[in-house]
Image (cartoon, rainbow, N blue to C red):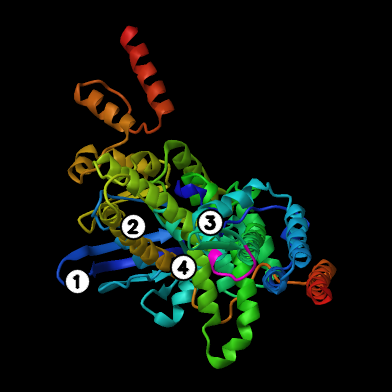
Amino acid sequence: MLKDITLGQYFPGESVIHKLDARVKLIITMLFVVMLFAANGVFSLSAGVIFLIIAYSLTKLSPSLVAKSIKPVVPVLLVTAVINIFFFEGNEIFRLGFISITDGGLKNSAFMLIRVIALIAGSSVLTYTTSPIELTAAIEKLLSPLKVFKFPVHELAMMMTIALRFIPTFIEETEKIISAQKARGADFETGSIRDRASAVVPVIVPLFISAFRRAEELALAMECRCYRGGEGRTRMKQMKAGPADAAALIITFAFLACVILIDRMN
Amino acid sequence: MTLASEKMISAENVHFSYDGKTEILKGITADIEKGQFVAVLGHNGSGKSTFARLINSILVPTEGKITVLGTDTSDEEKLYDIRRKVGMVFQNPDNQIVAAVVEEDVAFGLENTGVSPEEIRERVDEALKAVGMYEYRKHSPGMLSGGQKQRVAIAGIIAMRPECIVLDEPTSMLDPAGRKDVMNTIKKLCGSYGITVLLITHYMDEAVQADRVIVIDEGRVILDGVPKNVFSNVEILKKAGLDVPQVTELVFKLRKQGIDIDPDVLTEEECVNALASVLKEGKT
């Protein structure tokens, strides 16, 4: 059950997208988000979606991975989509008692649905093709001007690296604890919401204890490997933006311009 | 082994206590020479892991002193010099891997010490090849088995080109196949790279493979010598809560029954040969 969560996982590969500079990928992802929310018409939003499809097909990863990353949020999406239907004005097309459905509501909720799914899929392209270390290195580089204001950029990046590294470990551990508690007769599936919520406590407590123990050991191991903060540190992988990165950025800007222009023309 | 007489680690009457009341170590004196493969043996709570932690100054002796290549471990200014010379591998492979990609984890220590990117690349590849994990360099550590993870951890240490590696029960969380792989890697480190190895363990069959065995019980060294001599003290070992290797146990029991068999046999093969010759003599 928990293993299905793929958000934030990296799938090594050799595709064009994999080889792009992490900073460029991060910027492109942000531009993509701007693109999605700037798009207000059917054509402009389609342009955004086409951009995503092209990017994703270039990663050479299986499309089922995207489905996996969207699956956990489907219930939330559906509920918000349904609520959205009733909250936008427009021409009424259907009425049942006080419930009225308008074309504006339908359009808005469809757009919202597409935007959010594209958003998740788009950020999946980033995290699937960029190793967490590259990603945090990119964040560190992009945020480094903030060091002037004593912002702990390196520490933040290191914390993110470790958090990402331990996600699979903790998922595995949670599953083990759940099995252990089930073996002792714990019930996670039946009972009222309150019962189920309190059944989670015996899972959370051992998980936290183990997390603290791991943190202590990891800190020790890091110290033993001469870690003492960001100062004087080098990196094996130097970030070098090449022609491919420039091309990717230009293409992204072109798409963004298209999206904005299409909306202007209508 | 040209500098065989040079001391890698020297412990002089080392005492240690966490709380100032109960002493974990009660006067340990031992010299470890360069290039040696030394096993430190003891049951749980004997103080063997504490001793390991004193060597690269995670802990500092409360009494006595430890020097690493002549540098006192209590000298805080030399802390990182010592840690660069003495690498440490811990018990749980999961809790010492920092990065989410094998090669990036191996690079971690080198990045910390400010080595140039080109050299890091070179040393990382070399270290991964040395432990036989080069094909896995792009993998996520989560996908590896325990033994493979531990070999990655070892690669992360040897990439820093230390003079000595301290391994604190590196195989206790592994399956038999993983243990064998890790042991082979450790022996290779010592044999082919001339790195001094200090293996903390409670497995007899691992200690047998060392050049020298130091047995610690209740914070004191009770036996120290080549495996053959150490393991012939079956009664002392049993008193310290340790099992002797199966072969030694068998020979010990046979000798007690009055069968004249060579007491120095350690490996299964030696034992088979010794038994065969005893049987042959019996027949003629």
**Chain of the residue that carries numbered disc 4 in the rendered image:** A
What is the x, y in percent for residue B168? 38, 55
Say whether mark 4 and mark 3 are on the same chain: yes
From the viewer's perspective, is A252 left or right of B27? right
B56 within the magenta span: no
The answer for how far apart the CA atoms under marks 4 and 2 are is: 22 Å
Return the mark for residue A222: 4
From the viewer's perspective, is B13 left or right of A77? left
Q: Nearer the viewer, mark 4 or mark 1?
A: 4
The answer for how far apart the CA atoms under marks 3 and 2 are is: 31 Å
**Chain of the residue that carries numbered disc 3 in the rendered image:** A
Tell whether label 3 touches label 1 (CB within 8 Å): no
Closer to the camera in the image, B22 or A190: A190
**Chain of the residue that carries numbered disc 1 in the rendered image:** B
- The amino acid at mark 3 is Leu
Disc 2 secondary structure class: helix
Tell whether label 1 touches label 4 (CB within 8 Å): no
- Write the start and end of the magenta stretch as one range: A86-92
The picture quadrant where one finds residue B102 is bottom right
| Residue at image mark 1 | B19
- The amino acid at mark 1 is Asp
| Residue at image mark 2 | A207
Closer to the camera in the image, A126 or B20: A126
A89 within the magenta span: yes
